[in-house]
Image (cartoon, rainbow, N blue to C red):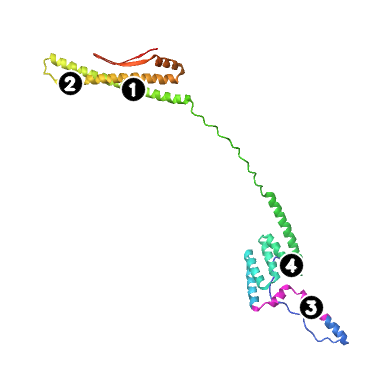
Amino acid sequence: MSSRPFSVGAPGGGPGGGNAWRGPGRALRRLVLVLSLAVVGVAAGATSGRDAFAMQLTPAQKSEMKMHYDKATRAYDIQKYTEAVEEYQKAYEIGGDPAMLYNVAQSYRLNDQLPDALRFYRRYLQRSPNARNRDDVERKIADLERTIAERRKALATTVPTAPTASVPTLVAPAPSRPPTSQAVSEEGIGATTVVGIVVGSIGGAALITAGITGYLAKKKGDQLSEDSNAMKTYDPSLQSDGKSLDTLAKIFGVAGGAALVTGAVMLAIGLSSSAPEHRATAEKAIEGGMAFAPVVGPGIMGAAASVRF
C-alpha cells in the first residue's frame, strides 16, 4: 500500500431506487420489504466513518477542513512532515475524520518519529476498527514495534556507563623543618666574607691615598728647603700645604691600616668558617687574642696587628 494520505470529500451516494415491488401476495411483499431494510442498514453500517462525520459538518466547516487538508498534503508532498502533522491535526479537530489520524501517523513515520507514528496508527484503528486498510496498518504497527525495540537495545549497548569516581588518595605534606644551624652558618659565612673583602678594599684604598698624600707633602717640604737654600722668597703656602697633606696622609694611613687589618680578620674568619680544616686555627686565634694598633712616626705610618695563640 502506498504512503499517500487519505483524501477527504463529500459522502457517496446512497442506494439506488427502483419500481415498486409486486409479489404474488401481501405477506411476501412485507418479507421482501423487511429484508430490503436490513440490507440497507448493513450497508449504512459498512460506510466509512469519514462519510458519517462529513454528513454532520456545515458547509463552512467542510471548507475549512478541506483547506487544512490541502495545506497538509502540499507540505507532505515536499517532505515538510512537521507542518503536515500540524495541518492534519487541525483538520481532524474540525471534522473528526479518522483518516486524518492515519495521515498524522504516516507523517510521523516518514519523519522518523517512530513512537509518535506508532501511537497514531493505534489511535486510527481504535477510531476506525473496520478500516479497509487495517491489515496494512497492523503490519506497519508490527514493523514499528520491532524497529523501536531494536533501536532501544542498540542504544543500551552503546551508551557508556558512568565511570566510577575514584576516591583520591590524600598524601599528608611533610612537616616543614626549621632551617638547620648549618644553613644559618653558611649564610653568615657568606656575609662575613663579603664584609671582610669590602672593608679590606677600603683599607687598601685609604693606604694608597695616604701614600700619595705623604708623597705630595714630602715634595712640598723638599721644595720649601730648596727655596730656602737658594735664598728665594719664602712662600708660606708651601709650608701650609705641606702640613695639610702630611696630616691627611697620617689620617688616611691610620684609617686605612685599621680597615685593612679589620677586613683581613673578617675575611679569615669567613673563610675558616667555610673550610673545616681552617676552623680550628681561627678559633685559636680568637681565643688567644687578636689586637691591632696604628703606627705613626717620622716618615712612617700604618697599622700593626698581633695574634696570640
User: Which amino acid, by three-letter code, is at mark 4?
Assistant: Gln
- What secondary structure is marked by label 2? helix
Foreground: disc 1 or disc 4:
1
Asked if labels 3 and 1 touch by Cβ distance under 8 angstroms, the answer is no
Instruction: Please rate how many residues cluster around mark 1, counting C-alpha atoms within 10 Å: few if below 14, some from 14 to 19, many from 20.
Output: some
Q: Which residue is mark 1?
A: 201
Provide the residue designation for mark 3.
Answer: 41
- Left or right: 96, with 230 as reference point: right
Q: State the CA–CA distance, disc 3 to disc 2.
A: 158 Å
Mark 1 vs mark 4, CA separation in Å:
113 Å
Residue 141 locus on image (x, y percent): 73, 62
The residue that appears at 67% across and 64% down in the rendered structure is 107
Could you tell me how far apart the alpha carbons at marks 4 and 3 are, in whole angstroms? 22 Å
Mark 1 vs mark 3, foreground winner is 1
Q: Whole-Å distance between the Cαs marked 2 and 1?
A: 31 Å
Callout 1: helix, strand or loop? helix
Q: CA distance from mark 1 to mark 3?
A: 135 Å
Q: Is residue 56 magenta?
A: yes
Q: Which quadrant would the N terminus be assigned to in this image?
A: bottom right
Pair 2/1: label in front: 2
Query: Label 4 belongs to which residue?
Result: 126
Q: Secondary structure at mark 4?
A: helix
Instruction: Give the total number of marks visible in the rendering.
Output: 4
Which sits earlier in the primary sequence, circle 2 or circle 1?
1
Judged left or right of residue 233, residue 304 is right
Which of pointers 1 and 3 lies earlier in the amino acid sequence? 3
Residue under the image location 68 percent in, 67 percent down: 103
Label 2 amino acid? Ser
Q: Main secondary structure of the magenta part?
A: helix
Mark closer to the chain start, 4 or 2: 4
Report the span colored magenta.
35-59
When the figure is inspected, residue 301 is found, relative to residue 156, above or below; the finding is above
